[in-house]
Amino acid sequence: MRSPEYRDRLSTGIVHFGPGAFHRAHQADYIDRLLQKDARWGIAAVSLRSAGTIEALKVQHGLYTLAILDARPGFRTIGAHSAFFGPPDRAEVRRQLRDPAVRIVTSTVTEKGYCLAGDGTLDFTHPDILHDLEQPEQPVSLVGWLAMGLADRRANRLAPFTTICCDNMASNGRKLQAAVITFAQRIDPELARWIEGEVAFPNTMVDSITPATDERLRQLVRDATGFDDAVPVSREAYTQWVIEDVLADGCPDLASVGVTLTGDVQAWEKAKLRILNGAHSSLAYLGLLLGLETVADAMAHPALCAFVERLVTEGIIPTLEPSPIDLRSYAAATLARFRNPAIHHRLSQIAWDGSQKLPYRLLDTILDARASSRPIEQLAVPVAAWILFIERQARAGVAIVDPLADRLTALGRSSDPVEAILGLRQIFPENLASDAAFSSAVAAAASAMRIEGVAAAIGPSLAVSSVKK
């Protein structure tokens, strides 16, 4: 594997928590291009849970292959990472966070990694948060690490680092900022006030379909490059990174490598979460119930493809209007991306952590539809499909990948899983859980899929009738 030219000049300017496939296919690609003209911005990768990827990257001297899967695949060697730290490397991570050269801390730890409650605030009953409040200098949560790192910067009279959340959550920067401040208030109110006044937490939106790495990808890379890469990553050609334009002085020139800096991330964020991610989750749960394997397979299924197209245009887009974005063009381009047969994006991967994803991807859309007296029958279908998926997995004894797995498994085996799961306040907020029209729509959709079969239940006869508040 050929090392990028900048590697002998590389120094660390960014610390990243969560060096999974998406980070290495997306943010690291942008930084790799930046490093070709400014080698100060190498990434120190930190894994809070598992050292598997970290150790594999160390063996490969930090190098790995990025495969761009399109009509004509392309392959690049990424060398943007300057250091690697696993769970035992606590002292080294702490030193890195207080290094004055580090100006940015980024994160891709999935929605569950922020330890937030259903209302988006910090969950003070979460075991990791309870641990970190008791032992703030031995953190295990991302929030705890950020609070300690910022406390060290303050104590050493250093400028704070800018914290950039790159996970799919509405107002992700604001949520992370509030979580870190409320955590800090419990351990040091002066620190909390300093963070509130001095530290930037920009909202962001990230987008590029990134399938999980599997043996199929490893073989593709071997055949194309001749290198036996243990940890290659792949993504589609399309990529986007939108960051609120509040970065502190001294941050890298991200705009020069295609990052969009804007004063209004929310429009991009909501369109992506609701159109792309909402459609993705709908395809995942309905597709898995239909016995399909990948997103491309789901889009090739006539009934499912037609349903998702109607869901986006009739159910989702009206909740986003007015918008500075051409939503119908964005939706058409998104669905075209889903049809890319070169992307082997497993529905099972998208289905993980549904309890954390559904509030942002579907439930917020339903709440807005109800507030404007718009119909919700179509929008209730993927929610019902998720519940039926949970029921199927639970009764078959198949493990559910979700932070609420134990609770969901128990409810999936109950006499009425729909009613039981809709009662989970960690997922369904009170104003939705108490909405009879919503619960009736979900129950009706689940019943139709059980009786008629999924393909028939999502057919064009699915009513889009007006539902009163």
Image (cartoon, grey):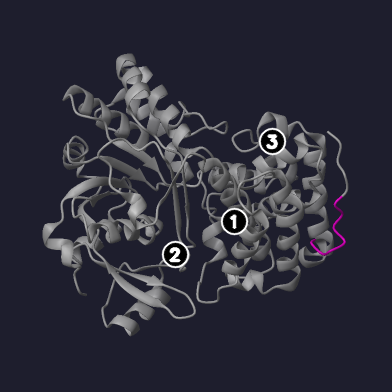
Residue 322 drawn at (x, y percent): 68, 43
Identify the secondary structure beneath mark 3. loop
Residue 398 relative to residue 307: left or right: left
**Label 3, label 2: how many angstroms apart (C-alpha)?**
32 Å
Say which residue appears at 50% left-offset and 47% top-offset: 168
Q: Magenta segment range?
A: 458-464
Q: Look at label 1 and name its amino acid.
A: Leu
Upstream in the sequence, badge 3 or badge 2?
Answer: 2
Residue 433 drawn at (x, y percent): 72, 34
Q: Look at label 3 and name its amino acid.
A: Gly
What main secondary structure does the magenta stretch of the protein show? loop
Say which residue appears at 23% left-offset and 56% top-offset: 81
Which of 425 and 438 lies nearest the eye of the viewer? 438
Q: Residues within 10 Å of mark 1 (few under 14, many from 20)?
A: many
**Label 3, label 1: how many angstroms apart (C-alpha)?**
27 Å
Residue 226 relative to residue 337: left or right: left
Residue 372 drawn at (x, y percent): 78, 36
